[in-house]
Amino acid sequence: YAFVAAKFFHFVRCLTMALINTLINKEKKILVVGAHPDDIEFSTGRLILNRNGRNVFAVCMTDGRKGQEGTKIRKILVETEYAKIREWESRNAMKELNVDEDKLYFLGLPDQEVISNPFIIDKLFLLIRKISPDYLLVPPWEGAHPDHDTVHLFTIVAAKNIGFGFNKIIEYGSYNNF
């Protein structure tokens, strides 16, 4: 069994390396969809940096207004003020990763309310069609945060409705609840 397992893991490693090489290819257009400001930067920042921001498009679904609850800054600011800071931080981080401002889309849904806004599937559909990416990067279905799971699901539905190939949809790493 050890021989079969070794062959299997070698196959998976080769497949993974091929995928990584494809995603690093700056000629391929990628669209990264995130639930909150900072999800994309934390989860795919290294990939974006390796590409020098070239042919990278990003969609942030929520304004992140409920993040960091209980911290000193959140006790001072109202949610809408905090949401503006989170978007500003995200835009600046993406600028540091060399992503052009015109390739960033902030949809501004209230944090933790994506599930209540299925109309957003239509916006995602239109963005995917407009950008016409070679690959879609989505948050994983993790069962830990409702926005992450809903963004995953809504992006898959929008991609399916446009005929986007499932073999071109890639889950990026995220935190988990373990």
Image (spheres, rainbow, N blue to C red):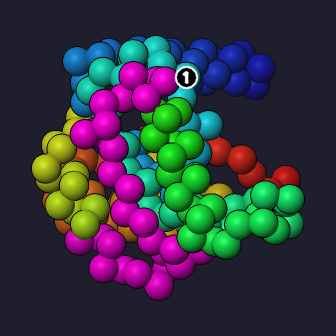
Task: Please tell me which residue lies in front, 7 or 17.
Answer: 17
- The answer to whether residue 131 is magenta is no
- Which residue has dot 1 on it? 46
From the top left corner, tell me how far across and down residue 55 is, in percent.
27, 27
Residue at x 53%, y 78% (from the top left corner): 113
In the displayed structure, would residue 82 be above or below residue 119?
above
From the top left corner, tell me how far across and down residue 53 is, in percent.
37, 23
In the displayed structure, would residue 59 be above or below residue 173?
below
Instruction: Say what amino acid the circle numbered 1 marks.
Output: Arg
- Visible residue check, residue 127: yes
In screen coordinates, is 72 left or right of 150?
right
Residue at x 58%, y 52% (from the top left corner): 86
Task: Please tell me which residue lies in front, 84 or 43.
Answer: 84
Q: Residues within 10 Å of mark 1 (few under 14, many from 20)?
A: few
In screen coordinates, is 73 left or right of 8?
right
In the displayed structure, would residue 172 be above or below residue 148?
above
From the top left corner, tell me how far across and down residue 77 is, in percent.
71, 66
Q: State how many labels appear.
A: 1
The answer to which image quadrant residue 27 occupies is top left
- Visible residue check, residue 22: no
The answer to which image quadrant residue 91 occupies is top left
Residue at x 69%, y 62% (from the top left corner): 67
In the displayed structure, would residue 131 be above or below residue 53?
below
Task: Please tell me which residue lies in front, 65 or 146.
Answer: 65
Label 1 sits on a secondary structure element that is helix
Name, please, the residue furthest toward the bottom. 116
Q: Quadrant of the N terminus?
A: top right
Magenta residues (range): 95-122
